[in-house]
Image (spheres, rainbow, N blue to C red):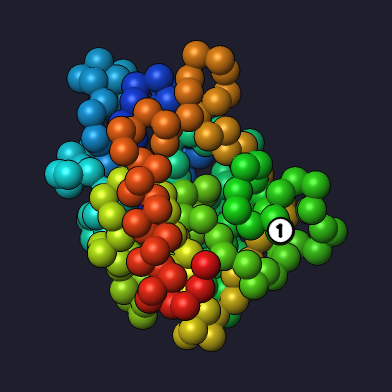
Amino acid sequence: MIPEIHNIVLSKFDDIFELFAGSFLEKIHFSKLLVIDDGLSNDIKEKYSDFFYLPSPKPFGACLSINLGMRETDPFDVIIWNDDIRIITENIDIILGEWSLKRPDLGILAPISTNVMNEDQLPQNRTSEPIKETKNDIGCGCGTYYPRKIIREIGFFDEAYAIGIGGREDRDYCERIKRKGYKFGIVQECEIEHGGGQFDNAVSNTHHRIPGQLAKAKLNREYFKQKWGLE
């Protein structure tokens, strides 16, 4: 039996979201998609009308938006996506859900991915074992699977991180999970591409299109260091 899974994506720009939506519809047929909408056009929402849309909290913030999605999808397991993702593996949600049931010791599961902070996720570091355990932190938006039991035990993302996208909130959540004794697992048969919004020359990096993002990321790094004593 596979747990019911809901997918959450945070999206702001039509051109980037279209790339994600196309691969989602092509590869995922089992679970639902909740879009935390921070400015998508009505044309896009009409084109992809099978998805459920919620306006993002104002001012927009990654933690605020993820927490909104986690609350709205309760009691189900969730997969969190950046919108600059291309899904490669068919039915990736089902595979991740099956492994979550087989390995309750894993607090987070994630696919193989390009452009991620955890080197164990990179395609060139793929192994023959079905699950590769890792002690390294896993970014929250690259097809990252969170069992509902973990969300209930750990709580939501820390909203004290500066408003914006990125900047240690995912590492913070990983640190909290690790301190509860859970491991992380990379599912070797699952794969995505994370392009940083750059699947073609017409789409620039998502973070660079949000004013003041670099300054906010610096504040988040400082807060993380103060909270955990880690860089």
Please state if 135 lies on the left or on the right of 6 as rendered: right
Identify residue for label 1.
Answer: 120
Relative horizontal placement of residue 197, taking residue 88 as reference (left or right): left
| Nearer to the camera, 222 or 67 | 222
Helix or strand or loop: what does disc 1 sit on?
helix
Instruction: Name the quadrant containing residue 146.
Output: bottom left
Depth check: 69 or 207 in front? 207
Q: Looking at this rendering, what residue extends furthest in the right direction?
A: 128
- Could you say where residue 211 lies in the image, as x and y percent from the top left? 30, 33
- Residue 21 in view: no
Does 109 sit above or below residue 14? below
Q: Position of residue 41 (x, y in %)?
A: 23, 20
From the top left corner, tell me how far across and down residue 125 is, in percent.
79, 53
For residue 56, above or below residue 222: above
Q: Quadrant of residue 160?
A: bottom left
Q: Residue at x 71, y 58 (%)?
A: 120
Mark 1 Cα within 10 Å, few/some/many (few <14, many 20+)?
A: many
Q: How many marks?
A: 1
The residue shown at (52%, 49%) is 143
Nearer-the-camera pick, 157 or 151: 157
Residue in the image at 46% along x and 49% along y: 141
Is 82 drawn above or below residue 206 in the view shown? below
> Residue at coordinates 51% horizontally, 55% vertically from top-left?
139
- Amino acid bearing label 1: Asp
